[in-house]
Amino acid sequence: MNRIQAENKLQRLFKHKSFYNDQWRAIEKLLEGKRILMIEKTGFGKSLCYQFPATQFNGITVVFSPLIALMRDQINYLKNLGILAECINSEQSDEENNEIIEKALNNKIKILYIAPERQENLKWLEAVKKMKLAMIVIDEAHCISVWGHDFRPAFKRIVDLVKLLPANFPVLAVTATATEKTAQDIKKQLGAEKITYIRGNLLRSNFKIQVARVEREEDKLGGILKFLTNIQGTGLVYTGTRVNTDIYANFLISQGIKAIAYNAGLEGEMRKEIELKLKRNEYKCVISTNALGMGIDKKDVRFIIHTQFPQSPIHYYQEIGRAGRDGKNTDIVLCYNPLDRDLPEHFIDTARPSKDRYERVVDILKNSPEPLRERDLTKKSNLKQNQMRVIKADLIEQGIIKEVMYGRGKRYEYQFNAPNLNTTKFEELRDYRLEELDKMIKYVEEHNCRMRYLRNYLGDKTNDVCGKCDNCLNKNIFWKNSSEMEKKVRNFYDSYFPELKVANGKTKLVNGVAASYYGFSNIGSVIHKCKYEKGGDFPDFLLKQTLRAYRKYFKNIKFDFIIFVPPTESGDLVRNFTEKLSKITKIPISYSLYKVKETKPQKVFQNFWNKKENVKDAFDYKNPQELFNKNVLLIDDIFDSGATIKEITKTLSKYNINLLSPLVIAKTIGGINVK
């Protein structure tokens, strides 16, 4: 098929008149059965490079994509064109996913989107062997490489699949963001001698990029509020953690801005609803971690603000790339405080677990009489689940452990005579990430064209300037609150109370509230001093803040009792605090909740399974008859996983309470969730 013939079909199938040159170059190679790595800017039209040839092949094109939002948008788009397309992902039920697999087996699908992590699913592994595959597509291909900015172990399985394919089987790997080092690694993994490499122009000529220097978080809040009141259109505000999505969204809402928080901790249906309303411009802005934006089909994002600088220029280019895809002028702002380096540095330090944690996993498997499930291995090693998955992938790659089928499930065992753990690569990677962070800071402090800096960093060596960034326009931007704005921010800080979302509809437990976040202002340091440095009772300002939270959140509930969580290591701190609170609220206090076994501090456990096991069957109540049909307020100092409160609820529910709700001084940030 020549280009003229292809473009005639393109107009009939996709309603487009012609291909860009790089699009046609990729499509032509795919139709010839070649392998391609394509790096093109967001909005270029990379999807068409596989969607068009997929319609010409006799068989199924499988698109591996980590972006559920992209899957949804692309499926709707293709179905509207009459092209048979479906997706398999974790937000759908097993029945829905199995039905789609059956369609694929019966050749009733042209394009099938699937999350890389689904390759762990046995049903999929069995089905894919029987499918009539025509082409493999790897979206967000930078995730293949450990040098990429979002490496995912599940992408290694795609590489393993590609290596099994015939040399003349078409494979397309696409991304908008890969440095030359990352690109060469992807090429090597996919077979460098067989791959065509296409890298396009990365200029976003409609971007007005600027850096706003700030000295405090308060100035970020005020500066963003002022910015939003003076700009047309809708956009995104990116924060560094899930907690900050709540803080910024609630502040803006309190000032009359239509905003909402978005992060990976939200239920799938809620995320879908926010994405849909964003596309309909029902929000002025969505406050999000980097979980939002990739693959969202919204071309008129008019601004993007970062409250925290990302780990590297490649992270930044990718995130701002979600704006202005319609080609119209778009504002891009990065807030910069030199002290903000701590957060990305924390993420770099924790991206690869420490050597002793690897050794802990190896020792457990070495001494286990049988292969272990991932969950059992996670519990025994007392690691977070995401850490376990990174360790597991690395140990498998080094040939130290192996994955085995055990019945219908997967388990892991130590390899006899395995090589010693090699951490050289991890150390090199950490050094590389720190170098990238330094380059991000260099971008912030750059005095020449910012767009040229980003393009050069990504391998586009063009020297022309954008003419629109703050440096090209010789503007220095500082955000500092006026006295009026400072008052607004302070009033918000005094009245913002994080909700404790613990209700599940199956128990008597209802949602509660915290007076603040543990890391908010100086609250965490004050609690720590009282608990671990013999600092005496919790001070009155914490009591006043907790009372404000109580009065605001519980104005519609009349409580019959106040009880408190029995201590593990804090003595009478919580008891004394509860007595003061009881005296002021005039709610009777009960001292009947007690421990029936010793527990360890929950902070020593790294995953919810171990936290839950630590407090299992640990509590009882001395006078259960007094609880019948009563509303109970439960006081504690710190809320972390919620395991303790849930266990207490389980115990008290046996005695027919009406409801139980927690009120705590501080909610932890939860290990700093980035997405």
Image (tube, grey):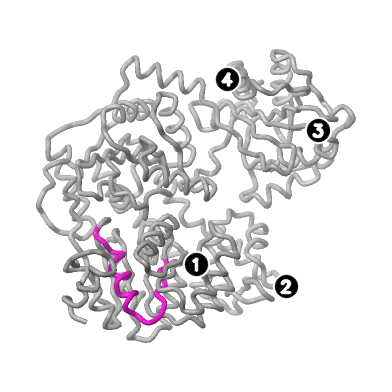
Q: Amino acid at mark 2?
A: Pro
Q: Amino acid at mark 3?
A: Ile
Secondary-structure class at tag 3: loop
- Total marks shown come to 4
Gap between marks 3 and 2 measured at Cα: 45 Å
Label 3 Cα crowd, 10 Å radius (few <14 / some 14-19 / many 20+): many
74 or 427: nearer the eye?
A: 74
Q: Up-down: is 92 above or below 19?
A: above
Q: Could you tell me residue 351's position as x and y percent?
A: 46, 54
Q: Which mark is residue 657?
A: 3
Residue on which the image places disc 1: 394
Q: Up-down: is 76 above or below 125?
A: above
Secondary-structure class at tag 2: loop
Q: Nearer the viewer, mark 2 or mark 4?
A: 4
* Circles 1 and 3 in contact, beta carbons < 8 Å: no
The region drawn magenta spans 44-64
Going from N to C along the chain, the mark reached first, 3 or 4, is: 4
